[in-house]
């Protein structure tokens, strides 16, 4: 070490050494990110795009001044690789590391925080020095249930993904226990992979992929071939599978309105056919069945679930055991919150095809939604009973003070008049809605100078003004609580009024 080096801070010396001997790991080979391995890793595998990585790091400026350290916080830093969650230098550098490896990274401003810097610790156009240790990495959990883990070998292009109903062209290789059991190029419609001996997990994962993407998918039994296995491929029950998939191209399904028009015309033409031979009639029914099923799919995409159910009913009228008709009707009913009916449809699908994993999965969804719905109802009714108890307590207090029996009056109004429901968010009484009888008993009228009790309440603006005139006419003091509703009889100046909840009565 020279005398000049001995007088420099350690971080500055390390940065200088890295600039001199570091390996250029940038794709452009522009020396924007330089790397030196301090301690080799203990594994041959590196993290892939989308992996969740766990690291410890220390960050310093080129002059050796430390600006951050995960070790000082005693907590690893976690991020998803290649997703732009960190500076470019990290996405590039960490992707080259092995588990357990410790390395130094020297990062030029264009691969760090650039001209903007990161105030107050990182100035503009700063070159940064990092010591990074790769602790661990895991594949991306696509649905956060551990059922499908994705590791991206090659990132796709653009930001568009196939949707259900899109036509995709893929290359796939399937492995079980290290043995390859499938390898093919195939073109199919997303959502119908099982027709090509492709497990449901591939259909689900394709909706997350981009054109040109090459990834490895780890499928749990639920998203694989499940309890039935796949005898054709020698796959046992509840086997875990690994697939390498390349999405070569796809055509997104999106012109649903136009498709509805076209399929509607087909249905009209076919339904007008008559005098057909038995063979022609069977062919016509087959086309009609396909048209109803396609219409149901379009209506599902357009979120017109009632029409989707109607089309499925017509399809099932032609073929009561049609798997797609039952499944799509179940989907529509599930989206309409008709959970029990949806569950019945999916159970019928399993009766037709016990190996339909999508239907089995949807039954679980129905059960979960039913439980959530029942729990929500339980909470709502619990709150409602509490409000009723509070209301009854107020009515009891009003009766004790000599107020008229409002419950009796409301019963009479219910028998004599029409009722409607109104929202009460603006009232601020904690009451969600109220019953209003527009043609009810005349509880209050102008000119009750001799009345022993006066109802005073706050209501909608027009109502409040009219009531106030009556009240001011007799000189009563004003106490604004509750809610007042009124109805002015034609050609008369009288205002039948009723309050809800029971208002304060002023002597």
Image (tube, grey):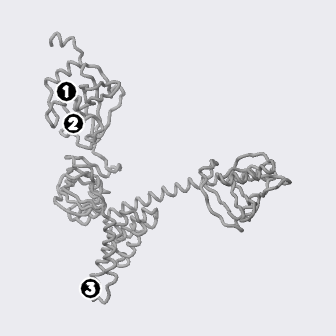
Residue 208 in the image: state x and y as whole percent: 28, 52
Q: Mark 3 = which residue?
A: 280
Task: Give the CA separation, mark 1 to mark 2.
Answer: 17 Å
172 and 239: which is toward the camera:
172
Q: Earlier in the sequence, mark 2 or mark 3?
A: 2
Q: Earlier in the sequence, mark 1 or mark 2?
A: 1
User: Given this view, does label 1 or label 2 mark the residue nearer the observer?
Assistant: 2
Does 336 sit left or right of 377 as displayed? left
Task: Say which element carries label 3.
Answer: helix
363 and 107: which is toward the camera:
107
Number of callouts: 3
Q: Mark 1 = which residue?
A: 38
Task: Say which element carries label 2.
Answer: helix
Does 251 sit left or right of 424 as displayed? left
Disc on res. 92: 2
- Farthest-out residue, right: 450
Q: Image quadrant of residue 441?
A: bottom right
Q: Residues within 10 Å of mark 3 (few under 14, many from 20)?
A: few
Q: Looking at the image, do the residues carrying marks 2 and 3 touch, with CB atoms under 8 Å apart?
A: no
Residue at image point 28% right, 88% down: 278
Q: Compared with residue 53, is residue 15 higher up or lower down, i.e. above or below?
A: above
């Amino acid at each position: 070490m020279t005398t000049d080096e001995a007088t420099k801070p350690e971080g500055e010396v390390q940065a200088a050494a890295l600039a001199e001997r570091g390996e250029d790991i940038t794709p452009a080979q522009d020396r924007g990110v330089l790397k030196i391995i301090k301690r080799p890793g203990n594994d041959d595998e590196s993290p892939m795009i989308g992996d969740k990585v766990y690291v410890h790091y220390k960050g310093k400026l080129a002059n050796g001044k430390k600006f951050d350290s995960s070790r000082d916080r005693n907590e690893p830093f976690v991020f998803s690789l290649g997703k732009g969650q960190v500076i470019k230098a990290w996405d590039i550098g960490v992707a080259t590391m092995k588990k357990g490896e410790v390395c130094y990274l020297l990062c030029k401003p264009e691969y760090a925080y650039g001209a903007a810097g990161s105030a107050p610790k990182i100035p503009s156009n700063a070159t940064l020095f990092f010591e990074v240790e790769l602790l661990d990495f895991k594949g991306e959990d696509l649905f956060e249930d551990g059922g499908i883990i994705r590791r991206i070998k090659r990132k796709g292009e653009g930001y568009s993904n196939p949707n259900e109903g899109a036509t995709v062209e893929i290359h796939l290789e399937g492995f079980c226990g290290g043995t390859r059991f499938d390898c093919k190029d195939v073109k199919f419609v997303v959502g119908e992979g099982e027709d090509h001996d492709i497990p449901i997990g591939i259909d689900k994962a394709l909706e997350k992929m981009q054109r040109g993407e090459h990834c490895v998918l780890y499928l749990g039994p639920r998203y694989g071939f499940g309890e039935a296995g796949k005898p054709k491929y020698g796959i046992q029950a509840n086997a875990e599978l690994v697939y390498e998939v390349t999405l070569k191209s796809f055509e997104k399904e999106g012109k649903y309105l136009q498709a509805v028009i076209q399929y509607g015309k087909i249905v009209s033409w076919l339904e007008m056919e008559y005098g057909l031979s038995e063979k022609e009639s069977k062919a016509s029914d087959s086309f009609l069945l396909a048209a109803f099923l396609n219409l149901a799919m379009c209506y599902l995409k357009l979120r017109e679930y009632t029409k989707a159910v109607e089309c499925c009913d017509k399809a099932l009228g032609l073929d009561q055991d049609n798997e797609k008709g039952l499944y799509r009707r179940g989907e529509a009913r599930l989206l309409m919150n008709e959970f029990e009916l949806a569950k019945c449809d999916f159970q019928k699908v399993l009766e037709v095809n016990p190996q339909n994993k999508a239907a089995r999965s949807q039954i679980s969804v129905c059960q979960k939604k039913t439980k959530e719905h029942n729990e929500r109802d339980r909470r709502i009714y619990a709150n409602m009973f509490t409000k009723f108890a509070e209301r009854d307590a107020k009515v009891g207090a009003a009766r004790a003070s000599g107020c008229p029996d409002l419950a009796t009056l409301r019963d009479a109004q219910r028998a004599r008049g029409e009722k409607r429901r109104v929202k009460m968010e603006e009232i601020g009484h904690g009451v969600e809605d109220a019953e209003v009888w527009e043609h009810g008993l005349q509880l209050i009228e102008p000119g009750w100078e001799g009345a022993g009790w006066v109802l005073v309440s706050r209501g909608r603006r027009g109502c409040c003004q009219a009531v106030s005139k009556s009240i001011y006419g007799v000189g009563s003091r004003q106490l604004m609580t509750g809610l007042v509703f009124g109805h002015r009889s034609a050609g008369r100046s009288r205002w039948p009024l009723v309050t809800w909840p029971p208002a304060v009565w002023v002597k």
